[in-house]
Amino acid sequence: MNLSIPSRGLATALVGLIAALQTQIGGASQLHHEDDLRAAQVLGFARFSEWAVTREGPIIIAVAGRPALAEALERVSAGKMVNGRPIQIRQVRQPAQAAGAHILYFGRTSGLRLSEAIQEARAPDIKWPILTIGEEDRFLASGGAVHLFEEDGRMSFEVSLAALQAVNVSISSKLLRLGYTSGANRRTRAAP
């Protein structure tokens, strides 16, 4: 499967969607609002990533330990497509249940030993690459690829280039410019 890298217009649309969700003020609770922001970012990674192994069918996003985020992903992705493919959300209890998923999201309340869970998701018996995204502060140090966090009242992210390389997933530079990258024990923010 070759997911094409989206155009600059789609990158601008993603930034607009995240910004709109971040500034939205309504009757929803703060937690609900944060889950929608996280969901929008996860969908952004689905749109702007390429997996080395060809697979047909829907883009599958598995969520471990965060039912509220799975619900937010269902809301935010309703009726939307990723590069012409439908989006399927799956709640899992263990990383091994994410077999076949393109993305595995680890919530703070997953109740798993993080580094072991990430290794389980990347185990050799899982035949395709999986992009791991999480919200624990130690997520990248535990072997995860993308860490979502709040910075100055906005959602941001940091990407481990080594973890991406290890699982044969690439992320468009257009998206990487919006967050931080870490490699060679350095954290940098790309210039826009």
Image (cartoon, rainbow, N blue to C red):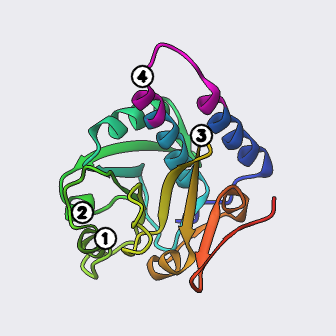
Which labelled disc corresponds to residue 118?
Answer: 1
* In the rendered image, the vertical position of residue 67 relative to residue 79, given as above or below: below
First in sequence: mark 2 vs mark 1: 2
Q: Position of residue 49 (x, y in %)?
A: 57, 61
What SS does tag 1 mark? helix
Residue 32 lies left or right of residue 164; in this view the side is: left
Residue type highlighted by circle 2: Pro
Going from N to C along the chain, the mark reached first, 3 or 1, is: 1
Q: What whole-number distance in Å separates the C-alpha atoms at marks 3 and 1?
A: 28 Å
Provide the secondary structure element on which disc 4 rests: loop
Q: Nearer the viewer, mark 4 or mark 1?
A: 4
- Start and end of the magenta stretch? 20-34
Q: Name the residue beneath numbered marker 4.
A: 29
Q: Give the residue pinned by disc 2.
A: 95
Q: Residues at badges 4 and 2 in contact (C-beta under 8 Å)?
A: no
Disc 1 marks a residue whose amino acid type is Ile
Quote the CA–CA distance across marks 4 and 2.
29 Å
Query: Which residue is identified by label 3?
Result: 153
The percent position of residue 42, horizontal first and vertical second, equals 49, 49
Query: Residue at the location (49% across, 29% down)?
Result: 79
Q: Quadrant of residue 95?
A: bottom left
Q: First in sequence: mark 4 or mark 1?
A: 4
Relative depth, front residue between 150 and 157: 150
